[in-house]
Image (cartoon, helix red, strand yellow):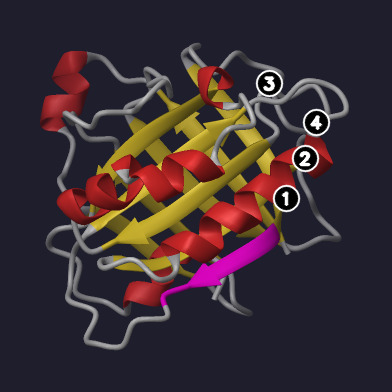
Amino acid sequence: MIIRFDFSAQSPQETCDDTAGVLFQRFGRGRVRFSVAIAQDELDRAGYGQAGYTRMEVSTIPERRPGHRSVNAPLSGTGLVLDTRTVFRARRRKRGPVLPGGILLITMCALAAGERERFLAQFIRAARFMEMQRGFIRAHLFESMASDSGCAFVNVARWQDAPAFQAAFASTAFQQLITGGFQPRSQILVARLQGCTHDARSHDCTD
């Protein structure tokens, strides 16, 4: 299954008029589509950037009908469409209930030629650390199918709340794991999931 990301930038008025929360649809044979508004936030990104997108739509597409190829657009542009495949999953290892709502942390990663394997090794080490942290729920790493897309990987992680993520992200132990130099070419977006009442797994668009 191909996972398609569509990042777009709306005008301030369109953003204000947009509905809050998550717009969600499920089709037959496991096909899913959902849309989230990118929130304003005060995260300390520790060297990571922040793209100017205001909405992310995610849909699943059967492999036999991939549709149009990924658009070659800069991360800071008005729009970006990526056809991707899931390459890694992480799930929380701490027991306890998963409450409704929370946040999505969307990290868009641009790499130079020859950096894929080094990036994946660093990402897996960092994900194993995050699996043990309070508030982490799950994460999926997606790899772009187009080499010229301007974004090689998209990581979508669900956390119980922003303070839990910020505490784990700012910890010395985590910062020592992300020393590969990818931060200046990666950007973090935040989407809030308040008001969601359906199964939390649906937000991953992969389960």
* Nearer to us in this view, 27 or 76: 76
Give x and y (percent) for residue 15: 20, 26
| 186 sits left or right of 73 in the view | left
Q: What secondary structure is found at the residue carrying circle 2?
A: helix
Q: Secondary structure at mark 4?
A: loop
Residue at label 4?
A: 115
Nearest to the eye among marks 4 and 3: give it: 4
| Residue sitting at x 37%, y 43% | 172
**How many neighbours does mark 1 have within 10 angstroms: few (below 14), some (14-19), or many (20 or more)?**
few
Mark pair 2, 3: CA separation: 18 Å
Magenta span contains residue 90: yes
Q: CA distance from mark 3 to mark 1?
A: 21 Å
Determine which of the numbered discs, if any, sits on residue 118 in the image.
2
Q: Which residue is mark 1?
A: 121
Q: Is residue 78 left or right of residue 35?
A: right
SS majority, magenta: strand
Residue 159 quadrant? bottom left
Q: Is residue 149 above or below residue 156?
A: above
Q: CA distance from mark 1 to mark 4?
A: 10 Å
Disc 4 marks a residue whose amino acid type is: Glu
Say whether disc 4 or disc 3 marks the residue closer to the N-terminus: 4
First of labels 2, 3 by sequence position? 2
Residue beneath label 3, please?
150
